[in-house]
Image: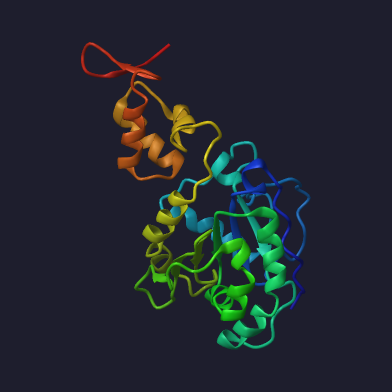
């Protein structure tokens, strides 16, 4: 079997340099050869990032998230993601046996967390998440992650487990490692838990009363219902929240017309 290369680095952006979304994978699942593309965001389909991250990119549409895959079309949401292979060397053992061996490399993870301060960490293997919850590892991360507020809430009833856990300084998701065992049904079952975590941790634009109000202006059309649908899809939020943002923009970005509709305020 051909040896796999390290996962290509994700371009650093304002959105992921601090307060972004970190996706952590086990080592050894990179591409067989590098793409010629450079300075690409995580979901750029012209870059082969190996079977695990490539498959993860395909999961987001199954969660109702219209993630951009072509360079030049990405928005703040796509630019907020970055990736890490951890630990740097494959841990000894198989399955649960790996967990204490992964935890011995906790300093590697801590260094990245201290440098980038993500709001959300997505572990693409529950073994990685179990490792950070071991007492010694959790103590080592206390300065940067705080302490666990919850023990971890299971977000699927499928056979492959997945968890959402809130620490005092960061949110964590533990998802199954993408493979032939992660069927479409399994992935779809994660949708609500994943979307809740993403919405809670979405990077906030600067100088905005509501974290999404500035970005919401990009989706403002004369048709109210169409506007709300586009806001919900483009901002990856629930329709009810999109409706509330739309209403908050009355008088600032749009005004009611004489027949009860909405028109853009010039």
Front residue (pair 183, 191):
191
Mark count: 0
Please, is residue 89 above or below residue 169 in the view?
below
Q: Is residue 4 left or right of residue 161?
A: right
At 39% from the left edge and 62% from the top edge, which residue is drawn?
Answer: 188
Residue 19 point in image, percent of width and height: 59, 49
Q: Quadrant of residue 237?
A: top left
Q: How is the image coloured?
A: rainbow
Residue pictured at 43% horizontal, 29% vertical: 219
Q: Is residue 28 visible?
A: no
On screen, residue 46 above or below 1:
above
> Is residue 79 visible in this depiction of the protein?
yes
Residue shown at 61% from the left, 42% from the top:
70
Instruction: Say which of 256 and 113 sits in front.
Output: 113
Residue farthest to the left, as pictured? 259
Image: 161 above or below 265:
below
Q: Quadrant of the C terminus?
A: top left
* Residue 174 in the figure: left or right of residue 98: left
Q: Who is closer to the viewer here, 57 or 26?
A: 26
Tell me the quarter of the picture where residue 162 sits: bottom left
- Where does the image place residue 46, in percent across and percent down from the top left? 67, 49
Pinpoint residue 86: horizontal percent, then vertical percent: 68, 70
Q: Is residue 115 above or below residue 182?
A: above
Q: Quadrant of residue 71?
A: top right
Instruction: Assign the N terminus to one quadrant of the image.
Output: bottom right
In front of the other: 216 or 33:
216
């Amino acid at each position: 079997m051909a040896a796999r290369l390290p996962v290509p680095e994700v371009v650093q952006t304002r959105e992921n340099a601090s307060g972004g979304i970190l996706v952590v994978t086990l080592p050894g699942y990179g591409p067989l050869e590098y793409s010629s593309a450079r300075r690409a965001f995580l979901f750029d389909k012209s870059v082969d990032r190996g079977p695990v991250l490539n498959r993860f990119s395909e999961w987001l549409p199954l969660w109702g998230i219209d993630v951009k895959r072509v360079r030049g079309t990405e928005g703040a949401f796509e630019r907020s993601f970055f990736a890490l292979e951890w630990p740097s060397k494959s841990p000894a053992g198989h399955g649960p046996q790996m967990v204490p061996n992964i935890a011995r490399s906790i300093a590697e993870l801590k260094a990245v967390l201290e440098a980038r301060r993500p709001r959300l960490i997505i572990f693409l293997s529950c073994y990685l998440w179990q490792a950070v919850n071991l007492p010694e590892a959790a103590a080592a991360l206390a300065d940067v992650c705080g302490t666990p507020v919850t023990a971890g809430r299971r977000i699927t009833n499928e056979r492959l487990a997945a968890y959402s856990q809130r620490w005092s300084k960061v949110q964590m998701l533990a998802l199954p490692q993408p493979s032939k065992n992660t069927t479409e049904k399994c992935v779809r079952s994660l949708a609500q838990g994943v979307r809740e975590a993403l919405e809670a941790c979405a990077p906030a634009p600067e100088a905005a009363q509501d974290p999404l109000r500035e970005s919401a202006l990009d989706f403002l059309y004369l048709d109210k219902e169409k506007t709300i649908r586009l806001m919900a899809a483009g901002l990856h939020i629930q329709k009810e929240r999109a409706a509330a943002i739309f209403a908050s923009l009355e008088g600032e970005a749009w005004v009611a017309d004489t027949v009860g509709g909405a028109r853009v305020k010039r």
